[in-house]
Amino acid sequence: MLKLYGFPLSNYVNKVKFVLLEHGIPFEEVRANFGQDEATLALSPLGKVPYVETEAGALCESQVIVEYLASAYPEKPIFSADPFTAAKEREMIAFLETHLELAARELYKQAFFGGTVTDYTKVRAEKRLRHGIAGFKRIAKFEPYALGTTFSIADVSAFVNLPLIGLTTKAIYGGDFLLEAGIDWKTHNKVVGERPAAQKVTADRLAFMDAQKKALPKI
């Protein structure tokens, strides 16, 4: 059985987990954090999560894993059967993860983990985010799903990434850049969040966060 390594706070782990649950692909979830030990590096060369173990070997990087699943389980409609529509799904995922989430990630240290980032980093990230969000708005539909009236793999990426981006800009700059641009990610997440796979991913993430809080030393 396929093994998925990671932890429930990771948006990219949750992306893969959502796909597995949504399409009924059997898997075992193995709790793992970032690591530089040889055992981890043998499965994930940079020690990042998520990574998976398959019967043929290990794979890392969330989109690579999703592409593998689509090929390994052709009976599962992970991507649209129409080539152009499937390409548009991949385009949106690339946009979300490369032009939005990657820029926001530079700010997570201060937004969520009590650290600080430099003013230079904030200025650079803001420029990248506003530019990326403007482009994303040109390809997004939200009618109510990311690419129109049908749920797709693009919605999985949007579900796990857009809240992080919106919450990050609000924490760092005082405003949600997505909502300000007219991208109603909250309604989208509510719609997608009704799916059983999304509910499971969310419940596991919240339970993990609660456990982390309870583990903190009491002052």
Image (cartoon, rainbow, N blue to C red):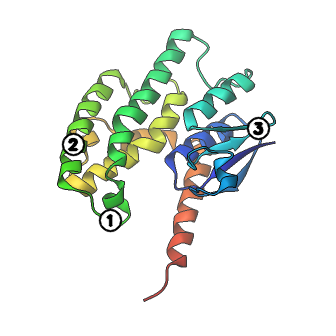
**Amino acid under disc 3:** Thr
Q: Quadrant of the C terminus?
A: bottom left
Closer-to-camera residue (156/56): 56
Q: Earlier in the sequence, mark 2 or mark 3?
A: 3
Front residue of 120 and 8: 120
Residue for point 39% across, 49% down: 164
**Residue 64 visible to an observer of this rendering:** yes
Q: In which quarter of the image is the N terminus?
A: top right
**Residue that label 3 marks:** 54
Quick check: 52 above or below 66? below
Quadrant in the rendering for residue 24: top right
Q: Which residue lies furthest to the front in this view?
A: 38
Q: Distance between the residues labelled 3 and 1?
A: 37 Å
Residue drawn at 54 percent across, 27 percent down: 152
Q: Mark 1: give few (<14), some (14-19) or many (20+) Cα within 10 Å.
A: few
Q: What residue type is labelled 1?
A: Gly
Q: Residue at x 56, y 32 (%)?
A: 63
- SS for dot 2: helix
Check disc 1 and report the residue beneath it: 115
- Work out whether mark 1 precedes mark 2 in sequence or the reverse, and give the earlier one: 1
**Callout 3: SS:** loop
Task: Tell me the residue that label 2 is attached to.
Answer: 124
Q: What residue type is labelled 2?
A: Arg
Q: From the top left corner, tell me how far across and down residue 76 is, in percent.
A: 71, 25
Q: How many marks?
A: 3
- Which residue lies at the image location 56% right of the left edge and 48% below the top edge? 48
